[in-house]
Image: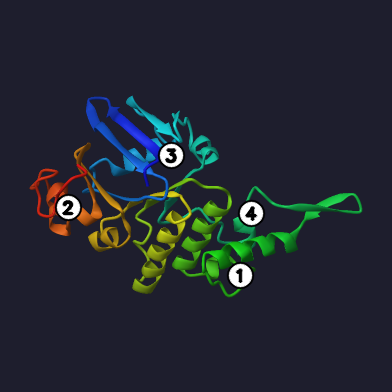
């Protein structure tokens, strides 16, 4: 994981006199999972919105795949291959799995000179994508409203991968899921990363961060309070960085890579 996918350089965000982000810098490599940690109001969501085009930074720069990157809208970020998956997801619950997977990208065929949906080909592609990810859904023709939270999340992540996603930002993705569904979700994150896709996960649950992340990036009061490989730290040290009781690089288990 040496090739940078996204590089943030001295990102700031001001709301009048309030400085939400103060010179945030870090990078994420292809296939790397970063846990973005911090207390409520630390600036995590603001940072994610800047990366995903929902907000524009006051200063600083970003590069994505080696090129300057300043998305003006979520649609621009999405077109570049960056997607944000929130707890409430973006699926249409009143239609089936196949329809959600191809929303806005429907395949058609010609019948008597008239274009109609190619339902069979779409269903085959969704079935293949789900099988490749090890996701089991009883029927791809089930309406999403009848599926579990974990199954809905699997649909969203598989859709992202299928359409050429490069970086996914997960904002508290498991907050409403049970233990078994969370376990499967964490496994899916590793499967997504194994395909060379960068993953940033915001979570308040330290156990989840240590289960899935390669690196911990801690934001405290708008600044990077710590950036350390998971294997070189522990939960107490990370919590200390979140609360301000431990300086980055001084906690137990800290080492090179700061």
Q: Secondary structure at mark 3?
A: loop
Question: How many residues crowd around disc 4 within 10 Å: few (fewer than 14), some, or many (20 or more)?
Answer: some
Q: Is residue 76 visible?
A: yes
- Spatial CA distance of label 1 from label 3 is 30 Å
Q: Which mark is residue 107?
A: none
- Spatial CA distance of label 4 from label 2 is 40 Å
Q: Secondary structure at mark 4?
A: loop
Residue receiving disc 4: 102
| Nearer the observer, 19 or 69 | 69
- Spatial CA distance of label 4 from label 1 is 15 Å
Horizontal and vertical percent position of residue 248: 14, 43
Q: Is residue 95 visible?
A: no
Question: How many residues crowd around disc 3 within 10 Å: few (fewer than 14), some, or many (20 or more)?
Answer: many
Q: Secondary structure at mark 2?
A: helix
The answer to which of marks 2 and 1 sits earlier in the sequence is: 1
Question: How many residues crowd around disc 1 within 10 Å: few (fewer than 14), some, or many (20 or more)?
Answer: some
Residue receiving disc 2: 238
- Spatial CA distance of label 2 from label 1 is 42 Å
Residue receiving disc 3: 52
Compared across the picture, whether 190 is left or right of 100 comes to left
> How many numbered callouts?
4
The answer to which of marks 4 and 1 sits earlier in the sequence is: 4
Residue receiving disc 1: 142
182 to 192, vertically: above or below: below
């Amino acid at each position: 994981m040496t090739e940078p996918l996204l590089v943030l350089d001295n990102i700031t965000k001001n709301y009048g006199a309030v400085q939400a982000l103060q010179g945030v810098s870090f990078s994420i490599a292809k296939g790397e999972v970063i846990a973005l940690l911090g207390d409520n109001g630390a600036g995590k969501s603001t940072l994610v919105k800047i990366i995903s085009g929902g907000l524009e930074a006051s200063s600083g720069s970003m590069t994505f795949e080696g090129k300057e990157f300043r998305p003006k809208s979520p649609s621009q970020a999405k077109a570049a291959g960056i997607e944000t998956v929130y707890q409430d997801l973006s699926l249409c619950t009143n239609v089936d799995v196949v329809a959600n997977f191809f929303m806005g990208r429907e395949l058609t065929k010609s019948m008597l000179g008239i274009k109609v949906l190619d339902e069979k080909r779409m269903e085959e592609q969704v079935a293949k994508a789900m099988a490749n990810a090890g996701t089991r859904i009883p029927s791809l023709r089930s309406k999403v409203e009848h599926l579990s939270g974990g199954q809905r999340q699997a649909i969203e992540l598989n859709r992202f991968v299928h359409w050429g996603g490069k970086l996914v930002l997960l904002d508290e993705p498991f907050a409403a899921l049970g233990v078994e569904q969370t376990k499967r979700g964490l496994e899916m994150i590793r499967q997504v990363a194994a395909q060379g896709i960068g993953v940033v996960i915001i979570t308040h649950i330290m156990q989840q961060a240590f289960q899935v992340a390669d690196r911990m990036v801690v934001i405290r009061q708008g600044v990077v309070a710590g950036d350390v490989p998971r294997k070189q730290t522990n939960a107490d040290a990370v919590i200390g960085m979140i609360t301000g009781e431990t300086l980055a690089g001084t906690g137990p288990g800290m080492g090179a890579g700061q």
